[in-house]
Amino acid sequence: MTTLRTLLWFALAALAMLGAVWLAERPGTVTAEWHGWRLDSSVGLLLVVVLGLMLLGVAGWWLYRWIVGAPFALLEGWGESRKKRGFRALTQGLAAVAAGDGVEAQKQARKAEQLLNEPSLTLLLSAQAAQLAGDRDGARQAFNAMLEDEQMSFLGLRGLIVQALREGDQGMALAYAERAFKLRPQTPWVVHALFDMQAQSGQWRNAQETLETGVRRKVVTQDKGRALRALLLVERSREVEKDDQGKGGDALALAREAFGLAPERIVTTRRLAELQVKAGDTRRAQKTLERGWAVAPHPDLARLYVEASRETEALKKIAALRRLVAGNEDDLESHLALAQAYLDAGLWGEAKRHLEIAGGPHPATRVCRLMAEAEERAGADPARVHDWLAKAAAAPADRAWRCSACAAQHEAWRSVCESCGAFGTLQWRAPGTFGQVLPPEVRAELEFSGASRA
């Protein structure tokens, strides 16, 4: 580009020189008469005079504009300087917030407010500085002021949600989350926050609508949405059953839908089987439990299966449990269920055989305790019983209901974790392991068979 510009200047200079030579060789004469005055000159001189007058005219116009516009230019320059200082204060305030210096952040926020006449820029800094300094009223006022600005209202709602949660006001946080969801239903944190709050407050239908919106907008994956919807249906089934005006058939229909969506979730199997047993349909309840055990075994399902079988004799209970575990006989829970049944029947050898298979080289606490019970019932040396009890104290932890979000342990399954408030995160697993995972081909097969049997 520079070379081209240089060549252009050389071309213009050459043309000017050629024009000057051409005029010098052809000077010509120009005569002008005006009121008795006569002026004789050459053409070249006349052109130079005209060009000079044009340059003087342009220079005069520029001088006039500079003189007239000088006051405004000074004011504008002072305003630019003020804005620069305001932005500098804004930047320093944000840096103070990032560094956790609440005092400095508030100082720079006040300075930025004075220098910048743009509340949309300074309100966020003022709110964050107030939060950092522990000024709840100041933060709330700043966030509420942000609601009046269309561009800042969403950020203001987010700040108010956080503020309400810190103060323990769940109702106000939920109201703000609903407003934020209406503004931007495609924002992931809004969908997840509103869903968890609705679930925590027992608004199962509203939570389901929020979840479906999240799935449609691809904020929630199809697989996760399927599992969460199933758990919501379980809770709705319980709610309908408790309602005096609700019909048992409605609760059963919701439970059946939940099981069809997520048969790999233990709670969907248990809920459907419980209602089927309650309705007197024990045969169908057994089929439900067998399908559920094949992908997600659990001690509660074994106890419920024995109840559904209506068997009272110990040996017949064993036969019933063998039918249950046939679809997943190598799982730890299958061996433990059979071991307990053999213990109740007084068959110590079979009980210990299943416990040895279940325990492997590093038996967990439940296996050790059952083995101690088997040795004691079999009349073994008390030292062996003591050894198994000592092993139980140092054995790896058993499977339990653990939250996949915060790892908190619960005695029984619940839809909302009491520790972190997350919905649908409790899974039956040992520490440091993942919960039941259902392969896609198995899930497709179960959904198909479930639809054909329903």
Image: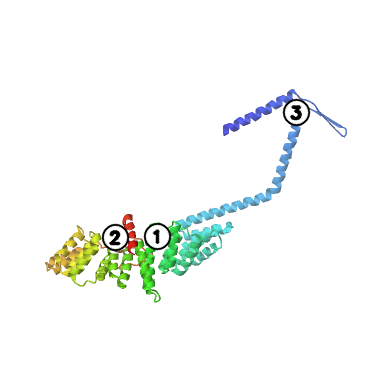
The x and y percentages for residue 275 are 32, 70
Task: Classify residue 382 by image quadrant.
Answer: bottom left
Image height of 36 relative to 299, above or below: above
Q: What element carries label 3?
A: helix
The amino acid type found where label 2 is placed reads: Val
Give the Cα separation between the discs numbered 3 and 2: 104 Å
Quarter the C terminus occupies: bottom left
Considering every residue shown, the one lying at the far front of the view is 452
The amino acid type found where label 3 is placed reads: Gly
Q: Is mark 1 on a helix, strand or loop?
A: helix
Instruction: Point out which mark residue 44 bears.
Output: 3
Residue on which disc 2 sits: 295
Instruction: Point out which mark residue 194 bears.
Output: none
The x and y percentages for residue 148 are 56, 63
Give the mark nearer the N terminus: 2 vs 1.
1
Considering every residue shown, the one lying at the far right of the view is 36
Residue on which disc 1 sits: 225
Single out the mark in the foreground, 3 or 2: 2
Residue name at image x 68 percent, y 27 percent = 17
Query: Could you classify mark 1 by the number of other residues whose Cα lies within 10 Å: few (under 14), some (14-19), or many (20 or more)?
Result: many
Image height of 15 relative to 437, above or below: above
Q: Which of 258 and 154 is in front in this view?
A: 258
Residue name at image x 19 percent, y 59 percent = 357
Give the Cα separation between the discs numbered 3 and 1: 89 Å
Give the Cα separation between the discs numbered 2 and 1: 19 Å
Q: Nearer the viewer, residue 400 or 227?
A: 227
Quarter the N terminus occupies: top right
Image height of 24 relative to 352, above or below: above
The x and y percentages for residue 347 are 15, 67
Single out the mark in the foreground, 3 or 1: 1
